[in-house]
Image (spheres, coloured by chain):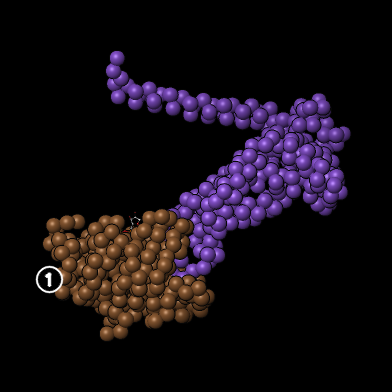
Chain colours: A brown, B purple
C-alpha cells in the first residue's frame, strides 16, 4: 500500500504550550484513517497540520515534517493555496456560505479562476451527485444553502470540497451535529468516496472509527500512543493505554 | 427586605421603558419643532431657486448642491481609505502594539471637536497647499473627520464575520485577498454601510469645519476648486446674522428631511442586503 502522507516527528506549539509531541504516522492512499483519543489530545491540531490550516493562527510554531507524495508540505517553497486544493477539509459544524447552493458548490472553482458557465454547471452537478444531493437539490440550486437541513448542509460542504477535486479529504468530527440516520448516510458515503480519495477522519465515536476506518491512531496528550490497522487496534491493542481507552476504562 | 424578582423585573421594565420613551420624545419634539416652523417655507421654488439678498429671499438650491457635492466628495475619499485601512488592520496584520496604537489613534481622532479639523484643514489644505476655500479643501477635511468612524465601524463589521467563513474559504485554496473580497466584505457590507452613513450624517450636519475650509459662497460651484456653502452653513449664517429666521427654519427643515431620507434609504438597503444573504 502506498503512503499518501507521511508525518515525521511533528512538534507543534501554541505559544509555549506543546500540543503535538514528535508525532509520526503514515496515511495510506485511498484508505480511511481515523484519529481517536480523549478531548484536547490534539486530534484536530494534527488534522489541521495536513493542510496547513494552523498557519492561520498566530503564535503557532511547527517543527518536523509532513510529506505529501514525498514532498514536505512545510518546505518554504510550498504553494499553500495549491496544497489546500489537494488536501481539503470538512469541518465539525456544517458551514455553508450565506450564498445560494450553487454558489457554494462552485466557490472553489471560482477562486481558482474558472468562469466558464458550462464547466461550473457540470462540476456542480458532478459534485452534488457524488455527495448524494443532486436528486434532492437539482431544482433548488438557487435557494440559500443555510435553509437546508443540517445533514444536507454537511453533505453540501462535502460537495463544495469535491468540486475542487482534492486528493485527500480531512474530516473533523463531521457527524457530531447529525442524527444517527444522517450519520449512517455519511459513513456509507465515506466508504464510497474511499475508492477515489484518501480520507482522514477525527471522531469521538469509537464505533464510527471501528465501522469505517482501515487504520486508526490513538492519541493522548499530544502523543501518538498507537497506530495500526483498525482491526488490530480495536481487538488486540499493543499498548495498555490504548486498551484502557478502547474498553472505556478511561476517556 | 428581600426584593421580589417579579417586582424588580417590573421596575426594570419601567425604567428602561421610560428611558426609551424619553429619547423618542426628545427626537420627535426636535423634528416636529423644526418641521412646524420650516415646512410652511418649503416649496418647489424655495428648493430650486437661487438665493437673493444674502438669503433673505429666494431659494437655497446652491446650498443643497453644496451639501450634496461636499458630502459625496468626503465619502468618496474616506470610504475606500477607511475600508482599506480596516481590512488591513483586521486581516493582514497580527495584533501587535502597532495595531493597538493605530486603533487608539483612530478612537482619539473620532473624538476631536470638528472645529479642530476645520483649523487643521484651513492651515494645510487652504493655506499651505493653496487650495483656497474650496470643495476640495472642504471634502478632504470632512473625509479626515469621518475616516476614524468608518475605520472603526468597518473593523467591527469585519470582526463580526464568522471565523468559519474564513476557514472554509482558505481551506478551498482561496488567497487572503480572495477571501477578503468574496467572503469578508460582502458579509460585512451592512456594517460598513452603517459607518458610511454615520459619516454622511456628520458631513451633512457639519458647520464649523466647513466654514473654515469650503467657505460660504452662495454661488453655484462650477468645479472642485470653487467655494461652496452647505445647507447647514446656510442655516447657521441666516440664523446667526439675523438675516431671516423664516428661511433659516426652511433650510433646517430641508436638512432634516435630507438626513432622515438618507437614513431611511440606508436602512432599507441594509435590510435588503441582509435578506438577500440569508
Ligand atoms: N488556537 C489555540 N491556541 C492555543 N491552544 C490551543 C489552540 N487550539 C487548541 N489548543 C490546545 O491544544 C490542545 C489540542 O487541541 P485540539 O483541538 O487539537 O484537541 P482535540 O483532540 O481536537 O480535542 P476535541 O476532541 O475536544 O476536539 C488542547 O489542549 C487545546 O486547548
Ligand atoms: Mg477537535
Q: Quadrant of the C terminus of chain A?
A: bottom left
Chain containing mark 1: A
Give left or right: position of A60 versus B152.
Answer: left
Q: How many marks?
A: 1
Can the viewer see residue B277?
A: no
Q: Compared with residue B253, is residue B99 higher up or lower down, i.e. above or below?
A: below
Q: Position of residue A93 (x, y in %)?
A: 33, 59
Q: Quadrant of the N terminus of chain A?
A: bottom left
Give left or right: position of B278 versus B139.
Answer: left
Q: Position of residue A153 (x, y in %)?
A: 33, 63
Give B24 or B108, whichever is nearer the viewer. Answer: B108
Give the residue displayed 30% in from the left and 76% down from the top. A26
Give the residue displayed 46% in from the left and 57% down from the top. A59
Q: Compared with residue A42, is residue B194 higher up or lower down, i.e. above or below?
A: above
Q: Mark 1 — residue?
A: A235
Give the residue displayed 53% in from the left and 29% down from the top. B24
Q: Position of residue A117 (x, y in %)?
A: 49, 77
Q: Position of residue B4 (x, y in %)?
A: 29, 21
Give the residue displayed 48% in from the left and 29% down from the top. B20
Q: Quadrant of residue A68?
A: bottom left
Q: Quadrant of residue B27?
A: top right
Give A131 or B271, whichever is nearer the viewer. Answer: A131
Give A100 or B52, whichever is nearer the viewer. Answer: A100
Q: Compared with residue B54, is residue A19 higher up or lower down, i.e. above or below?
A: below
Q: Compared with residue A201, is residue B75 higher up or lower down, i.e. above or below?
A: above
Give B111 or B189, whichever is nearer the viewer. Answer: B111
Q: Secondary structure at mark 1?
A: helix
Amino acid at each position: 500500500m502506498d503512503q499518501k502522507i507521511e508525518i515525521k516527528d511533528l512538534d507543534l506549539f501554541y505559544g509555549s504550550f506543546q500540543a503535538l509531541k514528535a508525532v509520526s504516522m503514515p496515511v495510506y492512499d485511498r484508505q480511511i484513517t481515523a484519529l481517536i483519543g480523549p478531548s484536547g489530545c490534539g486530534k484536530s491540531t494534527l488534522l489541521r497540520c495536513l493542510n496547513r490550516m494552523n498557519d492561520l493562527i498566530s503564535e503557532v510554531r511547527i517543527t518536523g515534517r509532513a510529506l505529501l507524495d514525498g514532498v514536505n508540505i512545510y518546505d518554504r517553497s510550498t504553494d499553500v493555496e495549491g496544497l489546500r486544493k489537494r488536501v481539503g477539509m470538512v469541518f465539525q459544524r456544517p458551514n455553508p456560505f450565506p450564498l445560494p447552493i450553487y454558489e457554494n458548490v462552485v466557490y472553489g472553482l471560482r477562486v481558482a479562476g474558472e468562469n466558464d458557465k458550462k464547466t461550473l454547471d457540470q462540476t456542480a452537478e458532478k459534485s452534488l451527485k457524488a455527495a448524494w444531493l443532486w436528486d434532492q437539490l437539482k431544482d433548488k440550486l438557487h435557494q440559500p444553502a443555510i435553509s437546508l437541513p443540517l445533514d444536507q448542509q454537511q453533505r453540501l460542504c462535502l460537495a463544495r470540497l469535491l468540486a475542487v477535486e482534492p486528493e485527500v479529504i480531512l474530516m473533523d468530527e463531521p457527524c457530531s451535529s447529525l442524527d444517527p440516520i444522517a450519520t449512517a448516510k455519511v459513513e456509507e458515503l465515506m466508504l464510497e468516496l474511499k475508492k477515489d480519495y484518501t480520507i482522514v477522519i477525527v471522531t469521538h465515536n469509537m464505533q464510527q472509527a471501528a465501522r469505517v476506518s482501515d487504520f486508526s491512531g490513538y492519541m493522548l496528550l499530544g502523543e501518538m500512543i498507537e497506530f495500526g490497522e483498525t482491526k488490530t487496534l480495536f481487538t488486540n491493542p499493543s499498548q495498555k493505554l490504548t486498551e484502557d481507552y478502547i474498553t472505556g476504562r478511561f476517556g | 427586605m428581600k426584593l421580589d424578582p417579579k417586582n424588580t423585573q417590573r421596575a426594570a421594565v419601567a425604567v428602561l421603558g421610560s428611558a426609551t420613551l424619553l429619547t423618542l420624545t426628545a427626537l420627535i419634539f426636535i423634528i416636529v419643532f423644526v418641521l412646524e416652523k420650516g415646512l410652511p417655507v418649503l416649496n418647489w421654488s424655495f428648493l430650486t431657486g437661487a438665493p437673493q439678498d444674502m438669503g433673505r429671499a429666494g431659494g437655497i438650491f446652491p446650498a443643497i448642491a453644496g451639501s450634496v457635492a461636499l458630502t459625496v466628495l468626503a465619502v468618496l475619499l474616506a470610504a475606500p481609505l477607511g475600508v482599506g485601512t480596516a481590512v488591513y488592520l483586521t486581516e493582514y496584520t497580527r495584533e501587535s502594539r502597532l495595531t493597538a496604537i493605530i486603533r487608539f489613534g483612530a478612537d482619539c481622532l473620532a473624538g476631536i471637536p470638528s472645529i479642530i479639523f476645520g483649523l487643521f484643514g484651513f492651515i494645510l489644505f487652504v493655506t499651505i497647499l493653496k487650495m483656497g476655500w474650496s470643495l476640495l479643501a472642504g471634502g478632504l477635511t470632512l473625509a479626515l473627520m469621518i475616516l476614524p468612524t468608518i475605520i472603526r465601524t468597518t473593523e467591527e463589521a469585519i470582526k463580526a464575520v464568522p471565523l468559519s467563513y474564513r476557514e472554509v474559504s482558505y481551506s478551498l485554496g482561496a488567497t487572503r485577498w480572495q477571501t477578503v473580497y468574496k467572503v469578508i466584505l460582502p458579509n460585512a457590507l451592512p456594517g460598513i454601510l452603517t459607518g458610511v452613513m454615520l459619516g454622511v450624517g456628520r458631513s451633512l450636519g457639519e458647520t464649523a469645519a466647513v466654514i473654515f475650509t469650503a467657505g460660504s459662497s452662495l454661488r453655484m460651484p462650477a468645479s472642485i476648486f470653487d467655494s461652496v456653502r452647505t445647507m447647514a452653513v446656510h442655516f447657521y449664517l441666516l440664523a446667526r446674522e439675523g438675516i431671516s429666521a423664516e428661511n433659516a427654519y426652511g433650510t433646517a427643515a430641508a436638512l432634516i428631511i435630507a438626513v432622515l431620507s438618507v437614513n431611511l434609504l440606508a436602512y432599507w438597503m441594509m435590510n435588503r442586503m441582509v435578506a438577500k444573504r440569508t
